[in-house]
Amino acid sequence: MADRAEPVRRRGGRAAHAPLSGLVPRQLWQLELLSQLARRRALAVRMAFPLALVIPLVTTGAPPFFAGMLLVVLVTLIGTVGTGVGVTRARASGWLDRLAVLPLPAWRVSGELFLAAFLVDAVQGSVMVAVVAVAHQPNPALLGTTWALVLSVLALANALGLGLAALTDHPGEIMLYLAVLLAPLLFLSGLFTGVPAQGIGHVVAGLLPFSYLHQAFELALGGNPATGDPASFAVAAAVTAVVAVTAAAGLGPAILRRPR
């Protein structure tokens, strides 16, 4: 862990009063989180990126269906790309090889990597929801369940990023795998064509959290989707969070094993 913390210490060495200089990580997730926070320029870009898209999107009168669609895609990309690229870079640097020989269970390693990435992404997602709240002022129940859905979908996206990172050593390949995985999932969720009123398409969309997040955003932006209410959003958020955490823990052995 000392090697991973080195960027933080070097920053502290250059600036004696740096905000992170006095923090000593005691858990793997804390070390990972501090490593991300120490990269101030990259962190600033990550925080500004969603704002640059969300603010004009929700304040210029874009149709709620299409605005909600783009917001769901943005939430999914934030979680999946950041985690997938970060883990593949950690493997390329040899950091995961060192974690593999530590007396830590594999589920804990993947779980703590997941937690550190999720915490940063949760701030980005919360800022997006705050912009929607200020611009459209949805009722508290809808706002709260939309926020819960954003966090749960971010968690699932982080778990998907971990799964993609188990397939390759190359960060660039993550984008290819991402397109192959997310395009059909988002299509089946009805983001591009709407959720079918009946049939297998309706059933499949009901099993995917992206459709609920789309409905929540559409409602929050003043739209009128055919289905969706705060109660169903709350249930979908809870189920998605459980699935995401379980998947992240179960991916431990795959993350620590080098792809063939």
Image: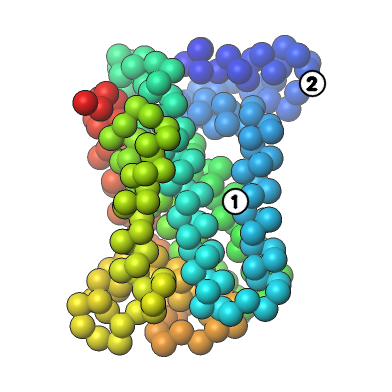
Name the residue tied to disc 1: 124
The residues tagged by marks 2 and 1 sit, at their Cα atoms, a distance apart of 26 Å
Q: Secondary structure at mark 2?
A: loop
At x 30%, y 19%, the residue is: 100
Residue in the foreground of this view, choosing between 154 and 237: 154
Say what amino acid the circle numbered 2 marks: His
Would you place residue 120 above or below residue 201 in this image? above
Would you place residue 175 above or below residue 92 in this image? below
Residue in the foreground of this view, choosing between 249 and 87: 87
At x 25%, y 40%, the residue is: 250
Q: Position of residue 239 (x, y in %)?
A: 33, 62
Residue in the foreground of this view, choosing between 46 and 216: 46
Q: How many marks?
A: 2
Q: Position of residue 166 (x, y in %)?
A: 29, 34
Quadrant of the image containing the C terminus: top left
Residue in the foreground of this view, choosing between 91 and 112: 91
Q: Is residue 46 visible?
A: yes
Say what amino acid the circle numbered 1 marks: Gln
Would you place residue 33 above or below residue 46 in this image? above
